[in-house]
Amino acid sequence: MAPLPLSPQDALVELSRIRLDEVGLDEVLQLIADLARRSLRGVAEVSVTLLRGGSPQSVAVTGDVALLLDEWQYRQGHGPCLDAAITGDTLLVSDTATEERWPVWAARAVDGGIGSTLAIGLPIQEAVVGALNLYGPTPRAFDAETVELARTFAAYAAVALANAHLYASTASLAEQMRTAMESRAVIEQAKGIIMGQRRCTADEAFGILARLSQDTHRRLRDVAAALVGRAASPTHSASANHWSGRVG
């Protein structure tokens, strides 16, 4: 069963209620596409283009035609959705049958049953830009009022995306830091075990771990974790001494 339509005002309220601690970036992107399709008059399909480091991708779509028309642009390097993402402009194709700026793409749109399109640039952050792409089934599907409503919706969406991207980046950084701290802790434990067994300094213990990492082609953290694990086992004394004795 298709979702019920929404008013543009209700769609904006939905965007403002997004809880970044409850939904991921991909879910925010799909929500933006779905809300645009449900709330903006004349829209048949919606996609969201993101451009990261010069590489475009449709990260949310509501139908196959939108995805196919987006991806054709990406392969050719031009088209309303891609150009809107790059420039940040609002690009309206009132009638794909008479469009002259992107005639080959427009012919494909006609073949796909798309009569008009509207692409609105989404400035998200310095490294990431994008576009909200609206596909209409008939020529002149988007009047002046709809274009203005779509621009307002896109402005709200850009804020939501920027916040979601920042939240995801921060969470990723926090996870990397946690992993690094765990790695450091287990390496320090392994050094302590080697120092106790070999009566050596911390630098010498680290050298033993590093050489074993190179000899076995394993990450330093994995080598350290294996030593700590063996030391914690019931037969740790003999096995750990034998293990650390392999490097001398």
Image (spheres, helix red, strand yellow):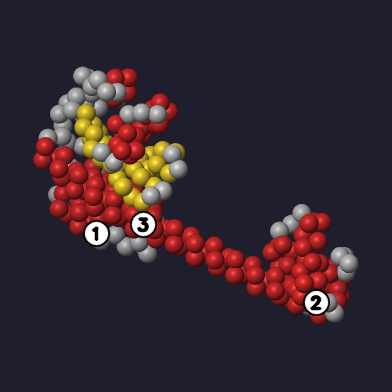
Percent position (x, y) of residue 238? 86, 75
Percent position (x, y) of residue 195? 80, 77
Percent position (x, y) of residue 59? 38, 43
Amino acid on which disc 2 is placed: Thr
State which tag comes first along the sequence, 3 or 2: 3
Can residue 5 be seen in this snapshot?
no
Residue 228, compared with residue 53, is above or below; it is: below
Give yes or no for contact between labels 1 and 3 (Cβ–Cβ under 8 Å): no
Amino acid on which disc 1 is placed: Ser
x 23%, y 56%: residue: 14
Q: Which mark is residue 201?
A: 2
Q: Quadrant of residue 136?
A: top left
Residue placed most toward the observer, 100 or 98: 100
Residue with the mark numbered 3: 164
Badge 2 crowding class, 10 Å Cα cut-off, few under 14, some 14 to 19, many 20 or more, is: some
Q: Quadrant of residue 178?
A: bottom right
Amino acid on which disc 3 is placed: Ala
x 86%, y 65%: residue: 247
Can residue 36 be seen in this snapshot?
yes
Q: CA distance from mark 3 to mark 2?
A: 47 Å
Residue with the mark numbered 1: 16
Depth-wise, is mark 2 or mark 1 nearer the camera?
A: 2
